[in-house]
Image (tube, rainbow, N blue to C red):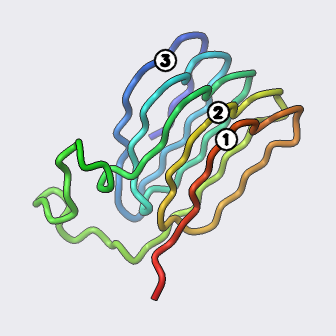
């Protein structure tokens, strides 16, 4: 899923990303386009978020589709039978050299693979909270 949004494009929106090995969510957001969103994905989804202007992902929360008990979705559901839960997709977050590009983003990235956070600009990832946790054993 490839999304490019400008201005108020997806502000306050909810997005349910595709899950499973080979699934990709790529979002390029400018200005206030993706502010205050709720994005649901899974550790099997490769995620790339690009904040191309200031405050692009302000107060956006990214969470695992299966970990949010309010959604009533389970890996045991018929739609997700055969999901390769051993695969750990990477996460890439970048402020694209824009000040405050990922401001106040919260990411619950349980069990993802490698992480790349690129925020070379002034306060590129200020007030971000990233949970890059993994199961042990």
Kindly indicate the quadrant of the structure image that contains residue 19: bottom left
Q: Split into 4 quadrants, where in the image is the N terminus?
A: top left
68 relative to 46 in the view: left or right: left
Q: Residue at the spot x=48%, y=62% of the render?
A: 110
Q: Is residue 111 above or below residue 69?
A: below
Q: Name the residue under label 3.
A: 11
Asked whether, in this view, residue 32 is left or right of residue 22, the answer is right
Q: In which quarter of the image is residue 22?
A: bottom left
Q: Which of marks 3 and 2 is nearer the N terminus?
A: 3
Mark 3 vs 2: CB contact within 8 A? no
Q: Are marks 1 and 2 in contact (CB under 8 Å)?
A: yes
- Name the element at disc 3: loop
Identify the residue under disc 2. Answer: 104
Dot 2 falls on a residue whose secondary structure is loop
Sequence-wise first label, 1 or 3:
3
Q: Where is residue 36 in the image (x, y as percent from the top left)?
A: 51, 24
Q: Residues within 10 Å of mark 3 (few under 14, many from 20)?
A: many
Tell me how far mark 1 sits from mark 3, CA to CA.
Answer: 18 Å
Dot 1 falls on a residue whose secondary structure is: loop
Between residues 99 and 6, which one lies in front from this camera angle?
99
Q: Residue at x 62, y 31 (%)?
A: 28
In the drawing, what numbered circle is on residue 128? 1
First of labels 1, 2 by sequence position: 2
Q: Nearer the viewer, mark 1 or mark 3?
A: 1
């Amino acid at each position: 899923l490839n999304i490019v949004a400008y201005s108020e494009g997806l502000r306050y929106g909810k997005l349910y990303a595709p899950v499973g090995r080979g699934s990709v969510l790529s979002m390029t957001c400018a200005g206030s386009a993706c502010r205050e969103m709720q994005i649901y994905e899974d550790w099997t989804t490769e995620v790339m978020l690009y904040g191309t202007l200031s405050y692009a992902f302000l107060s956006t929360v990214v969470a695992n589709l299966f970990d949010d008990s309010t959604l009533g979705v389970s890996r045991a559901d018929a739609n997700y039978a055969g999901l390769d839960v051993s695969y750990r997709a990477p996460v890439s977050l970048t402020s694209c050299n824009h000040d405050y590009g990922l401001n106040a983003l919260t990411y619950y990235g349980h069990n993802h693979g490698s992480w790349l956070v690129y925020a070379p600009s002034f306060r590129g990832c200020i007030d971000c909270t990233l949970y890059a946790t993994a199961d042990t054993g």
